[in-house]
């Protein structure tokens, strides 16, 4: 998501319906009416046209039948008034418009603007040689799947090679979920108003928004203070600071992590999680793997304390080591075998585990989902236990397994799915994917760091090690579980951004491990400079 503008972004996110329900009241309390708000919106978009395309002469504007279309008429009037050649295409030539949007259309017509019928000019949208296209077809008023005729308009906009500025939301994109319904405008810039919507940051949202420009229309303070939300963004300004270390410390000061995984043939995953924990600043890392893998993991990283175990040796090891560790990472390379299911069964018997902060990743999730499917009592009891300091870190397929749903239903509403997993497991959740969601009971946050080069094997193992570290290496004892997970997720993505500066292809997980210290240092420096910590 590195193309998005981050520095001035608020931390709060609001769903489309919250904005619709509250914008009028907020505007009135600020002494303006909705038409004046529409004027402000149109000016904000036209400012973007002038700033990004200062030499533009011919502009194509698409206006829908609602207030998003109203904004488009304001942009069109401003463009005419500044001497541009404006082609404005509107559904039914704007004849069915009502209220403020109708007033906006009249202001355009009064400025000698001409409204053309959208449906008769589909070919023009595809072929017209213009400097910029403004998409004012649909904003936060999108309901359900697009009507076929509207989908055709969007397809035509995407066909034209001219740059596109979307008003508020790229048309066709669900502003809450980031899902195209089923297609959406692919914009170069999106000027979004009043409050940030979650769909702009998750799933396909970032690919459709292009560069995001936030224009609060003078309402941010009023809106944020009067409307509560359970959603937020994770970026540099929202993460808690990691304190600088004192000089007089030793390895015991920064905790011990136990990684459980590394079945035969999958030792690399446990190595990556363990090394990521070390690179994140943990004092000591134990790795418990399947007998036969200990040599290769030790060779890859001699700093790890590796023990290879047969099935029958697992209970004794866990009873001895669990009380000594500050966090557990269960799953990297664990497999779904007799050995791994036995490991999980032994873990479920250890009372200490339920009090120890734990990351349950990959095959850790798959083994538990398998046991749950088999109606295993110990797993059911573990899920039901309230207030465990645990986090499940599923990707969409693993999420579907935990929930007994399809990947499609998870992806159609990632925020909803994350909360369903929170409720089912009584744990925190990181639902991975573009705009990973960090969720605990009643709150979800979308992460902004990271990039497509991170879509490669082993990246989840690295994240699990970083999370393991967040429980002990950064001296965040007073910080909530949610906030610890937010910083771990952000730093993992930032390390990925540092590693994939240029090419977004070909980075591998072990590269990212090496960037973790720089990412942590970078955030500490930023906090020192900007926040005076
Ligand atoms: N006066 C106001 O209320 C303000 C509204 N603002 C703008 O107004 C937008 C919201 O306006 P509205 O609530 O009127 O809604 P929109 O204008 O976003 O959407 C409604 C239009 O989309 C069409 N539509 C909805 N679902 C469809 C579907 N599935 N297939 C095809 N067409 C569909 C409707 O027929 C209607 O023409 C915001 O996104 C923002 O751009 C801003 O101007 C700020 C002030
Ligand atoms: K739009």
Image (cartoon, helix red, strand yellow):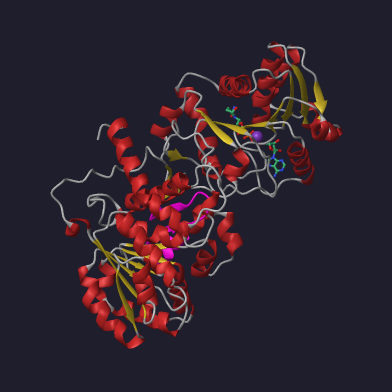
Measured along the vertical axis of the image, is residue 425 above or below residue 211?
below
Seen from the viewer's position, the closer of residues 99 and 276 is 276
Residue 29 position in % (x across, y down): 45, 23
Image quarter of residue 381 = bottom left
Seen from the viewer's position, the closer of residues 3 and 225 is 3
Q: Where ligand 1 lies, by quadrant?
A: top right
Residues in magenta, as a range: 420-442
Residue 245 position in % (x across, y down): 20, 46
Residue 108 position in % (x across, y down): 72, 17
For this view, does 282 lie left or right of residue 510?
left
Quarter of the image where the C terminus is located? top left
Seen from the viewer's position, the closer of residues 477 and 376 is 477
- Residue located 54% across and 51% down the image: 453
Residue 422: within the magenta?
A: yes
Measured along the vertical axis of the image, is residue 42 above or below residue 182?
above
Image quarter of residue 367 = bottom left
Residue 76 position in % (x across, y down): 70, 20
Seen from the viewer's position, the closer of residues 68 and 27 is 68
Q: Is residue 225 visible?
A: yes
Measured along the vertical axis of the image, is residue 426 above or below residue 198?
below
- Residue located 51% across and 53% down the image: 507
Measured along the vertical axis of the image, is residue 281 above or below residue 94?
below
Image quarter of residue 34 = top right
For this view, does 428 lie left or right of residue 58?
left
Residue 94: within the magenta?
A: no
Q: Residue at the front extreme? A: 299
Q: Is residue 442 visible?
A: no
């Amino acid at each position: 998501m590195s193309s998005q503008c981050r520095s001035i972004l608020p931390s709060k996110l609001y769903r489309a319906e919250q904005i619709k329900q509250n914008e009028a009241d907020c505007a009135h309390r600020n002494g303006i009416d909705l038409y004046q708000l529409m004027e402000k919106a149109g000016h904000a978009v036209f400012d973007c046209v002038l700033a990004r395309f200062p030499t533009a002469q011919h502009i194509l504007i698409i206006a829908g039948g609602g207030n998003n279309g109203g904004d488009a008429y304001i942009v069109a009037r401003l463009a005419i008034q500044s001497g541009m050649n404006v082609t404005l295409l509107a559904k039914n030539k704007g004849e069915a418009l009502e209220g403020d949007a109708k007033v906006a259309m009249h202001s355009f017509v009064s400025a000698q603007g001409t409204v053309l019928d959208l449906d008769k000019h589909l070919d023009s949208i595809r072929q017209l040689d213009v400097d910029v296209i403004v998409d004012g077809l649909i904003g936060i008023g999108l309901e359900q799947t697009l009507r076929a005729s509207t989908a055709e308009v969007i397809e035509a906009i995407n066909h034209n090679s001219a740059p596109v500025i979307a008003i508020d939301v790229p048309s066709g994109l669900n502003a809450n979920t980031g899902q195209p319904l089923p297609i959406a405008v692919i914009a170069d810039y999106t000027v979004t108003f009043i409050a940030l919507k979650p769909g702009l940051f998750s799933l396909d949202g970032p690919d459709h928004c292009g560069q995001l420009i936030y224009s609060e229309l003078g309402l941010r303070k009023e809106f944020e203070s009067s409307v509560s939300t359970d959603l937020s963004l994770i970026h540099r300004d929202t993460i808690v600071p990691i304190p600088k270390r004192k000089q007089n410390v030793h390895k015991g000061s920064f905790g011990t992590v136990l990684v459980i995984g590394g079945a035969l043939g999958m030792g690399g995953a446990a190595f990556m999680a363990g090394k990521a924990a070390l690179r994140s600043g943990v004092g000591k890392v134990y790795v418990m793997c399947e007998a036969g893998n200990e040599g290769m993991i030790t060779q890859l990283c001699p700093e790890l304390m590796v023990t290879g175990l047969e099935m029958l040796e697992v209970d004794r090891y866990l009873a001895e080591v669990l009380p000594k560790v500050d966090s557990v990472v269960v799953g990297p390379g664990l497999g779904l075998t007799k050995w791994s299911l036995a490991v999980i069964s032994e873990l479920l018997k250890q009372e200490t585990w339920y009090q120890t902060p734990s990351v349950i990743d990959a095959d850790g999730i798959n083994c538990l989902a398998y046991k749950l499917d088999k109606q295993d009592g110990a797993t059911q009891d573990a899920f039901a236990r309230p207030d465990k300091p645990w986090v499940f870190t599923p990707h969409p397929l693993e999420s579907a397994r935990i929930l007994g749903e399809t990947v499609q239903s998870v992806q159609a509403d990632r925020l909803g799915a994350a909360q369903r997993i929170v409720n089912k497991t009584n744990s925190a959740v990181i639902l991975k994917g573009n705009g990973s969601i960090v969720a605990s009971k009643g709150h979800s946050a979308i992460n902004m760091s990271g990039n497509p080069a991170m879509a490669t094997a082993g990246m989840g193992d690295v994240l699990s090690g970083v999370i393991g570290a967040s429980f002990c290496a950064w001296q965040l004892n007073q910080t909530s579980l949610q906030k610890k997970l937010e910083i771990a997720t952000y730093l993992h993505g930032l390390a990925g951004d540092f590693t994939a500066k240029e090419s977004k292809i070909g980075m591998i997980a072990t590269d990212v491990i090496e960037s973790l210290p720089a990412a942590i240092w970078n955030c500490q420096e930023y906090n020192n400079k900007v926040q005076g910590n």
